[in-house]
Image (tube, helix red, strand yellow):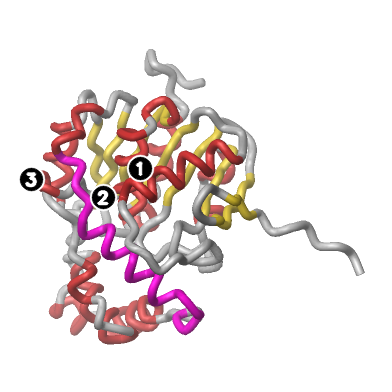
Amino acid sequence: MPTLPPMPYAPLDSLTLYFERAGDGPPLLFISGTGGDLRVQPNVFASPLAKAFDLLAYDQRGLGRSDKPDVRYTMADYADDAAALMAHVGWDQALVVGVSFGGMVAQELALRHPARVKRLVLACTSPGGAGGASFPFHEIEHLKGEARARHMIPISDVRRDAAWAAAHPDEHARLVELTAADPIGDEPGRAAGAHRQLEARADHDTWDRLPQIACPTLIAAGRHDGIALPATQEKMAARIPGAELRWYEGGHLFMLQDRAAYRDIIAFLTASPLGERR
């Protein structure tokens, strides 16, 4: 039988991260959202980013196939993990896309390790503090399966309210089934790791430090997002020097709902300082 290649694990100082890497082009670090797990398909490697960049993505601490130490995590820990993973693969600097919780990590990465971030995309995320926090997932941690799905569908996209569900019963039922699915929910350590992530998420606050972000920054947001609120996106864009804010037709998953999102993100990431394409 052929020998399978070793799994891509990065042994860092305090834990080991699972990562994947594919594609050609400028180096791009993708930081995933709450509960992100590369085993859940389709993942970012099925997106247009994999065709335009040398794409690096990973399971964050407490999630997926990465280590899940049952200790308190901080947002600084997550940012330092990202920087250490970049060093592990030999990257001094990269483009960075952070989505939802990953956008919170990306803010910390740009603040704690500014030399490592060449250009920054913050998608459907929030700064916390006086700038506004994203939806408090730690407050609904007790909700599981269909109950959680039914609670979150009209928050993820505020257009999908009770009236919409009544008018589109089949589509709503499919959304509930899809959102409730969690084939690896019973995996050992998963619940504890997910809880630790929510603890750190609840403490996220970069608001006072956002003016220190010096790299070109794009804030990408869904017009109908009830998790990362539109008003919060406007505050964040005004707080980060030179940040550009772009809106898309969708909710928290606007990157899947509006085809223009990936197109614009790729254009921003591949732009030169003078605004010309590389």
- The reply to whether the magenta stretch includes residue 277 is no
Q: Is any atom of residue 23 visible in this view?
A: yes
What type is the residue that disc 2 sits on? Thr
In the rendered view, tell whether residue 260 sits above or below residue 173.
above
User: Would you say 261 lies left or right of 185 here?
Assistant: left
Seen as rendered, the residue at the extreme left is 130
Instruction: Please name the predominant secondary structure of the magenta segment in the image.
Output: helix
Report the Cα–Cα distance between label 2 and label 1: 10 Å
Dot placed on the residue nearer the N-terminal end, 2 or 1 = 1
Name the front one of labels 2 and 1: 1
What type is the residue that disc 3 sits on? Ala
Q: Which residues, given as a range, are shown in magenta?
A: 185-207
Q: Position of residue 1 (x, y in %)?
A: 92, 69
In the rendered view, tell whether residue 47 sits above or below residue 153.
above
Q: Position of residue 21 (x, y in %)?
A: 61, 47
Report the Cα–Cα distance between label 3 and label 1: 19 Å
Residue 106: image tag: 1
Residue that label 3 marks: 130
What type is the residue that disc 1 sits on? Ala
Q: Which residue sits at x=52%, y=46%? A: 48
| Circles 2 and 1 in contact, beta carbons < 8 Å | yes
Residue 125: image tag: 2
Q: Secondary structure at mark 1?
A: helix
Name the front one of labels 3 and 2: 3
Question: What crowding class fits label 1: few (fewer than 14 Cα within 10 Å), some (14-19), or many (20 or more)?
Answer: many
User: Would you say 34 lies left or right of 3 here?
Assistant: left
